[in-house]
Image (tube, rainbow, N blue to C red):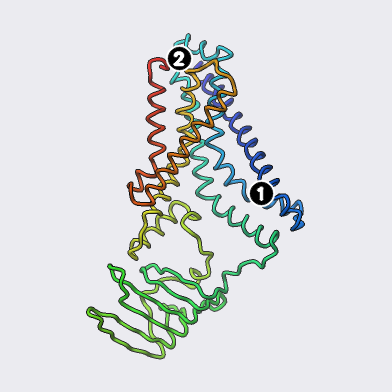
Amino acid sequence: MILRKLDAYIAFRFIRMIGLAVAAFVVIYVSVDAFEHFSRWVDKDVGLATFARYYFYGLPYIVVLVMPVAVLLCSLFLVHSLSRRNELMAMTCAGISIPRTFLPLLVVGLLASVFEMAVGDFLVSESLYRQSVVKRVEIDGHEPLDYSRRSDFAYRALDGSILDIGYYDGRTGQLSDVTILSFSDSSTITRRLDADRLLPTDSGWIAVGAELRLFGPGGSLVYSSGDTLAVPSLKETPEDFGSRPRGPTEMNFLELMAYIRREEAAGGDTREDLVELWLKFFFPLSSFIMVLVGAPLAARNPRSGKSMSIGLAILLAFVFFSLLRFGQTLGHKGSLDPLVAASLADAVFIVLGLGLNFRPGTS
């Protein structure tokens, strides 16, 4: 019963501190960014409602960005507070080990990582897109993009072929001035279909005004043409061509996995995408890892002041994000396996945290 009360007491204080720290970081981030672009706000005559909407849509990204540093700083401050008030010593004298005292901090850190993962995976990309729409339309005064009518764009199909599309009409679902290139496993062109129009039907796509070229070994060419030609290899629906194109960084974990499978099927290089995929899992774990490292470090220096805590938090965050960026770069270049590259910073800090927690001076 005593342990449960202590766990609840420590966890509640930690959660409250994290909430205040994240709020403070968000205010600082928004204030600095707003003052940096103050002249543009004035020149564009941006109203208060537009200003608020612009930063509201940026909140999920800011929260994900500052959460690990906030968790680290709060873990240092909380352990220092427990030490200064002799609460940590009282728990130790009652037979509760230091690592056991840190258990509620680790649980809260893990929950923060899960929260960060959920926000980053399901909210950040859409909110950043909406923020870009506010900037483009309401601040810069441009016309909104209409993806139901698109011209001169390329599209990679599910079978790996590439479509060069002159015009897409979302009202009818038709494609005009289309070229479809199909590739072999060695990325050489094996088939080219040129069509005046592609029409969607219940049985699939029909090419109108079609010219088909089949490229064989040794430079051989088979040419045929016709008024209409079925295109059974094209599995996309008309809505697929009218959806907003998104890069790998804008996709959630499952969407990026599907995108990578399509790229691999088409023979594309997926090293960078695989690194970004694993980073979507390993980066949110940084909140949990910051507690794993920060709490025992603070316990080993219980009498250091707040300025020392802030300095230590900045140093640890700098080292962590430097390792993260280092691994990401090596992964993109192919020097490290994508899984190893994405988990490099986490692995180093987990080893450091376990060593600090179970050294004789801590346990």
Which type of secondary structure does the marked residue at label 2 adopt?
loop
Task: Report helix, strand or loop for mark 1.
Answer: helix
Q: CA distance from mark 1 to mark 2?
A: 45 Å
Rendered position, 179 above or below 122: below
Left or right: 134 as drawn, with respect to 240: right
Q: Is residue 224 above or below residue 272?
A: below
Q: Are marks 1 and 2 in contact (CB under 8 Å)?
A: no
Q: Is residue 155 above or below residue 120?
A: below
Compared to residue 132, the image places residue 217 above or below, namely: below
> Residue at image x 45%, y 70%?
155
Residue type at mark 2 is Ile
The residue under label 1 is which amino acid type?
Answer: Tyr
Quarter-wise, where is residue 24 in the image? Answer: top right
**Where is residue 100 shown, x and y percent of the image?**
44, 20
Residue 55 numbered mark, or none = 1
Q: Quadrant of residue 340?
A: top left
Does residue 329 appear to the left or right of 166 in the view shown?
A: left
Residue ID at (67%, 43%): 32
Q: Residues within 10 Å of mark 1 (few under 14, many from 20)?
A: some
Residue 25: horizontal and vertical position, in percent?
Answer: 62, 37
Q: How many marks?
A: 2
Residue 106's mark? none
Q: Nearer the viewer, residue 225 or 6?
A: 225
Name the outermost residue toward the top.
93
- x, y percentage for residue 240? 48, 68
- The residue beneath circle 2 is 96
Q: For the C terminus, which image quadrant?
A: top left
